[in-house]
Every structure is written in structure tokens, then in C-alpha cells.
């Protein structure tokens, strides 16, 4: 700040405070140092931006902060540019919308704000209740079952939030998020577990699965659609990175899981009499499971082997 003041980029008011005038840039005047020499938020962000560049030599510096701070980061980027830092264009504010909760669905001690830890525990408990109702993990070791339940609860929460464009406000509905049908994390997890079950049965039956898809054995349009969908994964990941938008990966994972389930419903796999077609369907299944796992990993979500 003192360097900018000496170079005439900033100015000092009669009370000793230091300001920058951004009115010619369509903004306003911004306080940088109070009259007593103490800093404000923008001062600290200027300092840490320089510190981070010196330490990491970053290609891009992403500030993940709510959309109510958009103006703040506009000002920061402009100040860094005026100070002559060539990397100022690499500063990016990933502005995200607020997550609301349905009225009366969840309570918090404060009455207005829900603590993330409380929400996570609530989702894990909801997953446990659903698991008990469905009875799918009754014959599984208690420790393994608890881990699966935790995975499902966290997937419900993370996926429901990440499937929405970051910039949009959204309402998180706990009950809807853990539904095993529809665009949810547990639905995608269940699809992965279903495929793993099919592959385990194939191994038990002595079928060799090599993951290689032989085009000569493609027998229907659904298989072709799945192959085309699998081939789009690298483009989706690249687009998500370039646009700072993980919802592209989330919704791709859902589309892949949905298409596979339709394929699974319409065609036999293990009971297919033609060996070549059976191998193709098993290899296709294996690749779908792999891409689902990788896509969900990018979202910070684990997929269990069985559910």
C-alpha cells in the first residue's frame, strides 16, 4: 500500500487514511488503510495475493467465496492490475450462490444457520434409517455397513449441492437428496454397486472380463450410446475445469448411470448366450463403473463396492 501511495496510485486523506480512486473504472473510492495505519480486508487480500504468488507461482488463483463478495474481488483484481502485477488476470472469484434449507426440515441451535457438521451427521443418520428400512446391508459386517452408510449420507449431501451451477442459489432437501431414484448421489452409487455385483458374478462363473470393447460385437443402439457417452468424459472434465463448474461432472455421472440402468433393464448380460456379445457387455459395464468412480472421485464422493 505504501508503495502504491509513493507511486501516486493511491492517495491519502486529511485523516491519514489511504484510499484508491476507482471511479474512472466504474467503481468507487476504496479504503486501504485506516487513519491509525491499521488494515482492512482488502489490505490483507493484497498482501496474501502477493505472498501466494511468490510462494506458489500460480497459473490461477481461485477465491471460493459467496456471491455477496463479487464487488470486493472486482476491486482487488483492479488494484493488483494498477499496482503492475502481470498475474492480476489470474485472480478469479468463484462466486457461488447460497444453500437454503426447506422451512422446518432441519433445526439449528441459532435458529437461522445450520452448522455443516450437524447437517453431515443428520444425513448419515438419514442414510442409516433408510438402510434399515430397505434391509440391504443386514448381512454385511457391522463395520463395513457403517462405512457404506457414511458414504451414502455424504454422497447425498455433496452431490445434491454440486449438481447445481455454483452461481445459482439452491434449496437443499435432505429427503430428496438421499432418494435412490432420480438425480442423486445414492442413485449413482447404487448403479456402481450394481455393476460391481454383476462383475463379481461373472468372475465366479469363470467369465474373463478384459475391459476391451470389440466393435464387431455391438448388437444394439443402446450399447453404442453408452460407448459414445463414455468417450465424452475427458471433454466434460476439461469443460468443468475451464468453467470452474463441477456440476458438469455431476450431471454427466447421472446421465451415464441413468443410461446404464436402462441398458441393464433392457438386455441380459450374464445370461447372454453369444460369448462375444456377453464379453462386450461385461467390458462395457466395467468401463461404466470405472468412469462413474472417477467422476464421483472428482466431486469428493466415494462409491461403495456393494449397497
Image: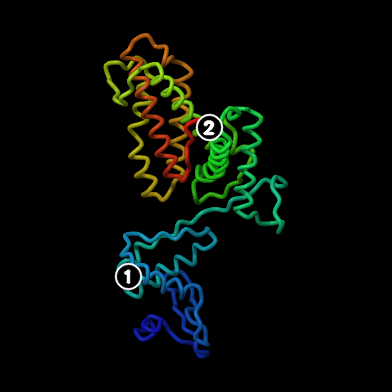
In the rendered view, does 266 fall on the left or right side of 98?
left
In the rendered view, does 167 fall on the left or right side of 119?
left
Q: Classify 10 Å Cα crowding around label 2: few (below 14), some (14-19), many (20 and above).
A: many
Q: Is residue 109 above or below residue 278?
A: below
In the rendered view, does 65 fall on the left or right side of 7?
right
Q: x and y percent of residue 99 in the render?
A: 59, 50
For image coordinates 38% across by 34% down, the residue present is 291
In the rendered view, does 5 fall on the left or right side of 170?
left
Of labels 2 and 1, earlier in sequence is: 1
Q: Is residue 198 above or below residue 292?
A: above
Q: How is the image coloured?
A: rainbow
Q: CA distance from mark 2 to mark 1?
A: 44 Å
Q: Which residue is mark 2?
A: 187
Q: x and y percent of residue 233 in the render?
A: 36, 37
Q: x and y percent of residue 204 in the render?
A: 41, 19
Q: Classify 10 Å Cα crowding around label 1: few (below 14), some (14-19), many (20 and above).
A: few
For image coordinates 58% across by 30% down, the residue present is 137
- Res. 216 image quadrant: top left
* Front in this rendered view, residue 166 or 237: 237
- View extreme (top): residue: 273
The local secondary structure at tag 2 comes to helix
Q: Is residue 53 above or below residue 39?
A: above
- View extreme (bottom): residue: 14
Q: Which residue is mark 1?
A: 54
- Res. 115 image quadrant: bottom right
For image coordinates 39% across by 84% down, the residue present is 2
Q: Residue 88, which numbered label?
A: none
For image coordinates 49% across by 79% down, the residue present is 39
Amino acid at each position: 500500500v505504501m508503495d502504491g501511495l509513493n507511486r501516486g496510485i493511491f492517495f491519502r486523506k486529511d485523516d491519514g487514511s489511504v484510499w484508491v480512486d476507482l471511479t474512472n473504472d466504474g467503481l468507487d473510492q476504496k479504503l486501504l488503510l485506516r487513519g491509525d495505519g491499521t488494515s482492512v480486508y482488502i489490505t490483507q487480500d493484497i498482501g496474501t495475493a502477493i505472498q501466494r504468488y511468490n510462494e506458489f507461482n500460480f497459473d490461477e488463483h481461485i477465491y471460493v467465496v459467496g456471491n455477496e463478495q463479487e464487488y470486493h474481488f472486482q476491486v482487488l483484481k483492479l488494484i493488483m492490475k494498477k499496482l503492475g502485477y502481470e498475474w492480476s488476470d489470474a485472480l478469479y472469484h468463484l462466486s457461488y450462490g447460497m444453500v437454503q434449507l426447506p422451512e422446518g426440515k432441519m433445526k439449528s441451535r441459532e435458529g437461522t444457520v445450520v452448522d455443516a457438521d450437524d447437517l453431515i451427521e443428520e444425513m448419515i443418520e438419514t442414510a442409516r434409517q433408510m438402510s434399515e428400512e430397505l434391509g440391504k446391508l443386514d448381512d454385511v459386517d457391522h463395520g463395513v455397513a457403517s462405512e457404506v452408510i457414511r458414504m451414502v449420507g455424504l454422497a447425498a449431501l455433496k452431490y445434491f449441492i454440486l449438481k447445481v451451477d455454483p452461481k445459482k442459489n439452491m434449496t437443499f432437501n435432505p429427503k430428496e437428496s438421499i432418494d435412490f431414484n432420480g438425480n442423486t448421489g445414492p442413485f449413482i452409487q447404487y448403479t456402481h454397486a450394481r455393476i460391481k455385483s454383476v462383475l463379481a458374478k461373472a468372475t465366479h462363473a469363470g467369465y474373463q472380463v478384459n475391459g476391451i470393447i470389440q466393435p464387431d460385437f455391438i448388437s444394439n443402439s443402446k450399447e453404442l450410446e453408452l460407448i459414445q457417452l463414455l468417450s465424452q468424459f475427458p471433454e466434460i472434465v476439461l469443460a468443468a475445469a475451464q468453467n470452474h463448474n463441477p456440476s458438469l461432472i455431476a450431471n454427466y455421472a447421472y446421465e451415464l448411470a441413468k443410461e446404464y440402468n436402462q441398458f441393464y433393464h433392457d438386455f441380459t448380460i450374464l445370461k447372454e448366450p453369444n460369448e462375444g456379445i456377453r464379453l462386450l457387455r461385461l467390458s462395457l459395464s466395467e468401463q461404466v463403473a470405472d468412469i462413474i468412480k472417477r467422476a464421483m472421485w472428482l466431486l469428493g464422493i466415494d462409491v461403495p463396492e456393494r449397497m
